[in-house]
Amino acid sequence: MPSAAPTQPPRGVPVWIGMLVLYLVWGSTYLAISIAVETIPPFLMAAVRFTMAGLILLTWSVAREGRAFVPPTRREWRDSAIVGALLLGGGMGMVAFGEQTIPSGIAALLIATMPVWVAILGRIFLGERLPRVAIFGIVLGFAGVAILVGPSAFGGAGSLDPLGLAAVLISPIAWSSGSLFASHRAVLPKRPLVATGVQMILGGLVLAVMAAVTGEFADVDVGTISRDSVLALLYLLVMGSLVAFTVYGWLLRIAPLPLVATYAYVNPVVAVILGAIILNETIDLRTVIAGAVIVISVAVTVTARGRMPTPRNRVPAPAVPPEAEPLTAGPATTAASTR
């Protein structure tokens, strides 16, 4: 992920155009995933998306640097594989699998709890001390999740598919684990595009293995894949994984981090609205209340953790929301993603 060290004030209209791109593109990736998995097996779809995006980024890096290009070391390959497996295999793979049965808007709200899980896992595994405000944000986040998925636990009206729900709930935990490992323990390539490209390629290979193990290669019928699913996959590849990532990196260099981090609060709202408009997903009072509670909890948790000491690394973010969710891996970050 590009390093965040902005020292200049926002540059007016260009910055807000960039923020609008992050809001709309990363907010719409949940919708695109839902459309893509209608006729493309989820793990296979994600494997194609990230492997191709990773190859494009790595090829671009090699071509741009020429003889000055320094290939990753063995340790960097190994740690990149771990990060890619957690972020893309466990994070994005579970999102794609879950959205076969879970509405895209609800999936976005549940995955928005990623900062909460980063805080919890950081406390458990890294001994990070959490401000009381962050603890309040964590409790509030779980309250929002309980409101959203409560009927599913008791079989009430509006209950969700248990398997899809479990996958979507696992996603932010896997993503948080990968983010923390990347920001505190991993040795990753110093060039942001190289680091992201390598993680995408290795994560894509993990997703391909997941597709093979679950029988997706044997079951897929190319003739049944719809044009809409193909277009959604291309949108995820080009806009979500390449264009938005480039804009994100540019914003981190020239805009204040608190402004850039607002995508973490806006993306779930955009996802819910688009799901309702395009896929006719229901927005009931329970979803509105739960969504508001979750978004507030994310804002509280991210703000509180933003005052904590900065980790030594930034997380190279794959382009998805969680595409950019690695911003939450540390105070200078909020998932990516990717976010």
Image (cartoon, grey):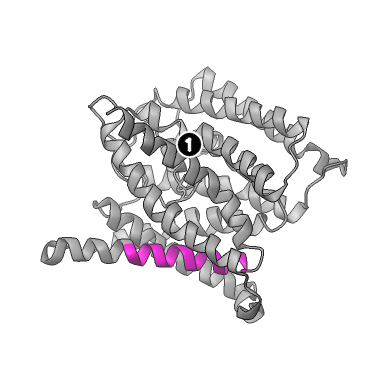
- Identify the secondary structure beneath mark 1: helix
Q: Is residue 152 magenta?
A: no
User: In the image, residue 307 lies at what x, y percent?
Assistant: 39, 22
Residue found at x 77% / y 34%: 284
Determine if residue 51 is in view: yes
The quarter of the picture where residue 32 lies is bottom right
Question: Looking at the image, which is closer to me, 57 or 205?
Answer: 57
Q: Amino acid at mark 1?
A: Gly
Residue at 59% x, 65% y is 229
**Dominant secondary structure (helix, strand or loop) of the stretch shown in magenta:** helix
Of all residues, the one furthest to the top in this rendering is 132
Which region shows up in magenta?
A: 40-56
Q: Which residue is mark 1?
A: 122
Q: Position of residue 75 (x, y in %)?
A: 30, 60
Label 1 Cα neighbours within 10 Å, binned few <14 / some 14-19 / many ≥20: many
Where residue 117 appears, as percent x and y from the top left, is 55, 38
Q: Is residue 338 left or right of residue 250?
A: right
Point 66% across, 63% down: residue: 38
Decide if residue 70 is in sight here.
no
